[in-house]
Amino acid sequence: MVTLTDNKELGYRTLLLATGGRPRTLNIPGNNLQGVYLLRTLTDANILREQITPGKRIVVVGSGFIGLEVAASALSKGAQVTIVEPQERIWPNIVSPELSAYFKQQFEKHGTQTYYGYGATEFIAGSDDKLASVRISPVQGSGQSQDIACDIAIAGIGIQLNTELAATADLEIDPRHGIVVDEHLETSVADIFAAGDVAAYPDPYAGRMHFEHWDNAIASGQIAAANMVGGDEPYRHVPYFFSDQFDLAINMLGYPSSSAQIVTRGDVNANKFTALYVQDGSLRAALMINDDAQMDLVRDLIAARAPVSNPQDLSSPSFDLSSLQPKDE
Ligand SMILES: Cc1cc2nc3c(=O)[nH]c(=O)nc-3n(C[C@H](O)[C@H](O)[C@H](O)COP(=O)(O)OP(=O)(O)OC[C@H]3O[C@@H](n4cnc5c(N)ncnc54)[C@H](O)[C@@H]3O)c2cc1C
């Protein structure tokens, strides 16, 4: 039985939990000030669209995908943007230092001030009680705190998965990845399924994982639906996400790790290239910048764990990626 907020009760034969996540908030002084924003809903986006106008000074806290997309949009609207990020570089877990530098350069080229290795520690109000500056401090070492004057601050520091409802039904929860499901996306309680951001599914290559992206929400929703009406379909899905920043159409496939050997193919200076990730002798992931012509092939190669004996070969434009396809037995 599912109880609604008005106490109405709904029976079910099969139930799907697709409760997603909510944005993490920065628990620092001043986070309720007017001028401090999060981005999750259409309403949030509409408010930001109205607020971000030419010349506005914006501090973006967090340089994950949401933070960088907001920063790129604000820059394209003529705002002045400062990015603050406690990690030492952009996406340190999934790209090489060279690729981090490439992305940072894209933002600096558009006039962004970046503070890597700094965290936001306080939102400070002006005499009108609205946000006037963000105090930032180095996360390591003895550097000085600084106050960045601004009109708007946007925190993009990830999401917290909405697992509370599942917990009330005593479903198994993985503290890091969400509601535990089996390969059919069924939870630890029979006939209750989970899909989307909140589903912690067993990936044959990566182990227990969840994936906070649109493509996974659609694909896992389809598999859960099939199994809820009696199907027998395991969830096998090469992770994929996209992000658009300035004129960069970014597509990421697979299981990127900065510890992989990363080989670049194409023309970095022309912003048209693919970084291929080789790990343990096989193709594991690809990051494509304005270069999606071979996306389906690369997805298939990652799914097949295509062996790569000599990673450097991949950088040659004449190397035919389809030759990596494992031959059928
Ligand atoms: C600003 C922004 C930009 C993004 N950009 C990209 C992008 O470029 N590419 C990409 O791949 N992905 C992107 N994403 C991620 C993508 O939107 C999510 O992965 C996707 O929405 C997840 O879908 P979902 O259905 O699992 O969860 P959600 O979309 O979070 O939906 C969950 C729903 O469940 C509701 N809910 C929660 N608890 C309860 C309850 N107890 N009872 C009833 N309802 C409940 C919530 O209110 C919500 O409506 C972006 C996300 C955001 C916020």
Image (cartoon, rainbow, N blue to C red):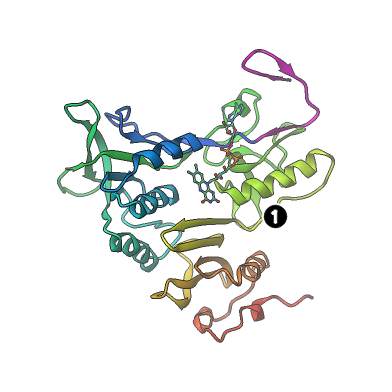
Does 223 sit left or right of 310 as displayed? right
In front here: 21 or 153?
A: 153
For residue 41, say whether it is visible: no
Quarter where residue 51 is shown? top left
Q: Can you say whether 82 is above or below 293 in the image?
A: above
Give coordinates of residue 145: x percent, y percent. Answer: 17, 43
Quadrant for the C terminus in the image: bottom right
What kind of residue is marked 1?
Answer: Arg
- Expressed as whole percent of the image width and height from the top left, the position of residue 197 reads 58, 42
For the point 51% across and 67% down, the residue is 288
Identify the element where label 1 is drawn: loop
Q: Position of residue 171 (x, y in %)?
A: 65, 30
- In this rendered view, identify the residue nearer to me: 208 or 30: 30
Magenta stretch holds residue 10: yes
Ligand 1's quadrant is: top right
Residue 267: quarter of image: bottom left
Residue 207 at what x, y percent from top left?
Answer: 61, 52
Give left or right: position of 57 versus 319.
left
Crowding at label 1, few (<14), some or many (≥20) Cα neighbours within 10 Å?
Answer: some
| Residue assigned mark 1 | 236
* 24 part of magenta stretch: no
Q: Which residues are magenta?
A: 2-17
* Residue in view at x 39 percent, y 34 percent: 25
Reply above or below: 172 against 57.
above
